[in-house]
Image (tube, rainbow, N blue to C red):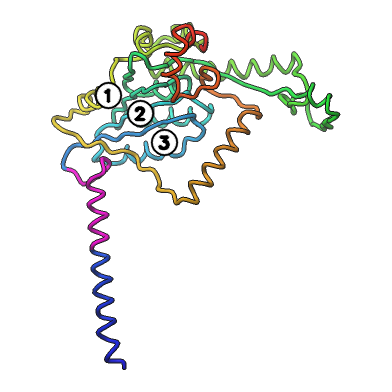
Amino acid sequence: MGKRKHPILTVFVILGVVVLLLGGTMILFLELLEPSSSFSFNEKIGVIPIDGTISSSQTITSQLVKFKKDEDIKAIILRINSPGGAVGPTQEIYREVRKTLPVKKVIASMSTVAASGGYYVAAAANKIIAAPGTITGSIGVIMQFIQLEGLLDKIGVRFEVLKSGEFKDIGSPDRKMTERDRKMLNELIQDIQEQFVNGVAKGRNMPVEKVRKIADGRVFSGARAKELGLVDALGNFQDAVELAKEMAGIKGAVTLVYSKKSRLRLMDLLVETAAESVNKFLQGIKTRIEYRWSGLPGLGPSQVDRSIGLYGREGVDSAG
């Protein structure tokens, strides 16, 4: 019996080896087809997309560090389509970009929106390219609260708060803000605003006073931003690639290496989607301070182009 089983086991082993070889070949083939493939004899430029609201810095900063250390990557392009976001993560990305400049050239390529924190990050780069109609600027800080005191009174709900100091429950939805509260928070906002202004001035090599004059939250088109010195050139992503090649001294064709996103399983994707929905709801009711452009009412970054067509120039200006 043992001798009869031996040929069957041999066949299974051979089949297993064949499957592994075919699988490995297929994976290699797919890797070669990807634009982010490292199997290329061309010079390489790293591309890091920054999409949507900036709520975390870890993925982007770690990719910056990875590209900075990779000797095959000759320059880095930040492809930005973001209205900004949380102050801390935005400043962390800005700092990592600045730390990268002595090692490699960094070019910011603006897409539909690169406003507020999105512009803050771009300002850290060596050069900025925007489309003429890109929505950018919005240099400013926003802090929002929700006030439920009137509603709670109507339904008979009261909060009992014990606190160690006058300002410990500042911004609480169950009480109105006092003048002392407003004064303290305005001082905080001005402090963070100055950090924004100084960051832009340093990154763009502009006088602080010149930046401060336009740092009132207004948004600009890419064309107007270029006139103000906030943008270096007008163009598209391919123009940014050509500029990166020129600054890095690359001749001929290049391979664009995109930062890889983890491939989530179906369950992971469902959990992430549900968590994002809950987070968006919570964002609407919790206190936050951000470098973020709120945009037109009810519209996200992906809808800005369409909103310009619907509302005309006046709609965009009033949003700033």
Q: Quadrant of residue 290?
A: top right
Percent position of residue 8, x then y: 27, 82
Within the magenta stretch, is there residue 317? no
Circle 2 SS class: strand
| Towards the viewer: 73 or 288 | 288
Residue shown at 80%/27% (left/top)?
A: 152
Closer to the N terminus: mark 3 or mark 2?
A: 3
Q: Residue at x 42, y 13 (%)?
A: 309
Residue 56 at what x, y percent from top left?
A: 50, 35
The residue depicted at 46 percent of the width and 50 percent of the height is 266
- State the extent of the magenta-drawn residues as a range: 22-40
The picture places residue 272, in percent across and down from the top left corner, at 52, 44
Q: How many marks?
A: 3
Label 2, on which residue? 79
Q: Answer with the quarter of the image where residue 166 lies.
A: top right
> For the residue labelled by badge 1, is the local secondary structure a helix, a strand or a loop?
helix
Q: Which residue is mark 3?
A: 60
Q: Nearer the viewer, residue 75 or 285?
A: 285
Residue type of the residue flagged with mark 3:
Ile
Q: Secondary structure at mark 3?
A: helix
Report the side of 185 relative to 301 (left or right).
right
Residues under numbered marks 1 and 2 in contact, where contact means CB atoms less than 8 Å apart: yes
Q: As displayed, is residue 129 above or below residue 258? A: above
For badge 2, the amino acid type reads Arg
The numbered mark, 1 or 2, whose residue comes first in the sequence reads 2
- Mark 1: few/some/many CA within 10 Å (<14, 14-19, 20+): many
User: Which of pointers 3 and 2 indicates the residue nearer the eye?
Assistant: 2
Front one among 271 and 202: 271
- Give the residue pinned by disc 1: 240
